[in-house]
Image: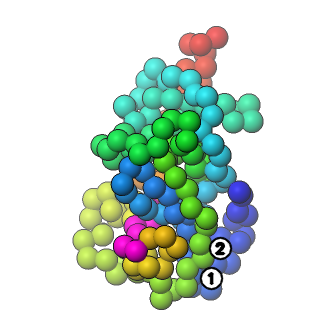
């Protein structure tokens, strides 16, 4: 699945929001579709010697090394799916990042009355919520999800500055393995 940036912008101009619902452990959330480059089954990965515990693997995607962010480890929970059943969501924008999740639902386009933007959510202007939270989808607006669904920018799940350093980390890991 690949969503052209023009399509994501057009949805934004109409006042809606396109999301990719994902799940890890017992938690459900969504990523804004304008952040998603593609999704794929979990391929074989290689260890990454440096980095935090939630960022210790890389994959080869079309000849490029991509860091894998283990969403369950980042959130301090266990995966619900076996490794062979997990999925990757490749995130676009700057350095490419792959987010490992247990499940992915079909993308959904939501009308402006189906969600609240971050600015309308109390407390969302502080700390990590300011960087990560884009919106809250109202209960029942996403197929198969009866509760509110946070829409999270997955790039904000990395420590501050780590996303900028990913290409250098990958180069050093590649040169160490050569």
* 154 and 26: which is toward the camera: 26
Task: Please check the rendered image and state whether residue 151 is part of the magenta-colored stretch, yes or no.
Answer: yes
Is any part of residue 136 visible from this angle? Answer: no
**Looking at the picture, does residue 88 appear above or below residue 125?**
above
According to the picture, the residue beneath numbered tag 2 turns out to be 9
Measuring from the top left, give residue 124's x and y in whole percent.
30, 69
Q: The magenta stretch spans which residues? A: 146-152
Q: CA distance from mark 1 to mark 2?
A: 6 Å
Measuring from the top left, give residue 24's x and y in whole percent.
42, 51
* 28 and 65: which is toward the camera: 28
**Looking at the picture, does residue 36 appear above or below residue 143?**
above
Q: Secondary structure at mark 2?
A: helix
Q: Residues within 10 Å of mark 1 (few under 14, many from 20)?
A: few
Label total for image? 2
Residue at x 48% of width, y 79% of height? 141
Q: Residues within 10 Å of mark 2 (few under 14, many from 20)?
A: some
Q: Secondary structure at mark 1?
A: helix
Measuring from the top left, give residue 117's x and y in whole percent.
42, 78
Is any part of residue 120 visible from this angle? Answer: yes
The quarter of the rendered structure image containing the C terminus is: top right
According to the picture, the residue beneath numbered tag 1 turns out to be 13
Residue at x 55% of width, y 85% of height? 111
Residue at x 53% of width, y 43% of height? 86
Contact between marks 1 and 2 (CB within 8 A): the answer is yes
Which image quadrant is residue 125 in?
Answer: bottom left
């Amino acid at each position: 699945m690949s969503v052209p940036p023009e399509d994501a912008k057009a949805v934004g101009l109409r006042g809606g929001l396109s999301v990719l619902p994902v799940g890890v452990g017992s938690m459900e959330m969504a990523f804004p579709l304008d952040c998603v480059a593609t999704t794929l089954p979990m391929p074989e990965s290689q260890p990454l010697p440096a980095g935090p515990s939630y960022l210790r693997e890389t994959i080869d995607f079309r000849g490029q090394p991509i860091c894998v962010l283990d969403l369950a480890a980042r959130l301090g929970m266990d995966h619900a799916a076996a490794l062979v059943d997990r999925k990757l969501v490749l995130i676009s924008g700057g350095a490419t990042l792959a987010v490992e999740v247990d499940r992915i639902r079909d993308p959904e386009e939501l009308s402006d009355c189906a969600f609240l933007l971050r600015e309308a959510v109390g407390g969302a202007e502080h700390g990590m919520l300011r960087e990560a939270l884009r919106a809250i989808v109202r209960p029942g607006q996403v197929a198969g999800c009866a509760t509110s669904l946070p829409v999270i920018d997955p790039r904000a799940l990395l420590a501050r500055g780590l996303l900028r350093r990913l290409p250098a980390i990958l180069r050093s890991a590649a040169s160490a393995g050569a």
